[in-house]
Amino acid sequence: MTLNMEEKKTLSKYRLDKAERLLEDAKLLLKEERWESSINRSYYAVLSAAKAALILFGIDPKTHEGVKTMVSKKLVLDGLISKEYGKWFRTLLFEREDVDYADYVIIDPSEAEDAYNNAVRFIEKVKDVIEMLIKQISIKGE
């Protein structure tokens, strides 16, 4: 799929809006003490936000591993986000896999709260990155 810059910006906004909705779901699930489901939604919120940033570079990974790799290569290594944010992404991915697929996983409420809080921080940072990228694109006139 080849997108022009306006289409990339539209898709980025859609994905960022989706990330916000998923984050709200994670918050509601935390309040209901549904720890596993809250971690799942926190991860998918971060995934959607990461994909919102990556599409502005024309990068659209189709797998979770692909997104993880490109977060590291394009966002962390290029200095757009710190290594800490990349670590949060990986941790959320692994936690989501555990709560979705592993047997006898016991989640402490603080783990779900940490997952949610890290998702909030990650998404706020990615919003800043997206805003900066869109300004750069506008200046270049693309």
Image (cartoon, grey):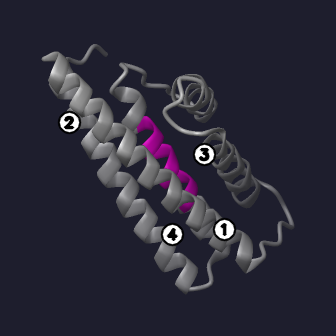
Give the residue number, with chain letter if any, for mark 2: 10
Label 3 amino acid?
A: Tyr
Task: Name the mark on residue 114.
Answer: 1
> Magenta: predominant secondary structure element?
helix
Q: Note whether 1 is above or below 54 in the view shown.
A: above
Q: Residue furthest right?
A: 104
Marks 1 and 4, Cα distance to the nearest angstrom? 12 Å
Label 4 amino acid?
A: Ala
User: In the image shown, does 74 or 99 lie closer to the viewer?
Assistant: 74
Marks 2 and 4, Cα distance to the nearest angstrom? 24 Å
Q: Earlier in the sequence, mark 1 or mark 4?
A: 4
Q: Which residues are magenta?
A: 42-51
Q: Earlier in the sequence, mark 2 or mark 1?
A: 2
Give the residue number, with chain letter if any, for mark 4: 26
Give the residue drawn at x 43%, y 61%: 22
Q: Earlier in the sequence, mark 1 or mark 3?
A: 3
Q: Nearer the viewer, mark 1 or mark 4?
A: 1
Marks 3 and 2, Cα distance to the nearest angstrom? 24 Å
Marks 2 and 1, Cα distance to the nearest angstrom? 31 Å
Q: Earlier in the sequence, mark 3 or mark 2?
A: 2
Q: Nearer the viewer, mark 1 or mark 3?
A: 3
Occupied quadrant, residue 109: bottom right
Judge whether residue 110 can be spotted in this image.
yes
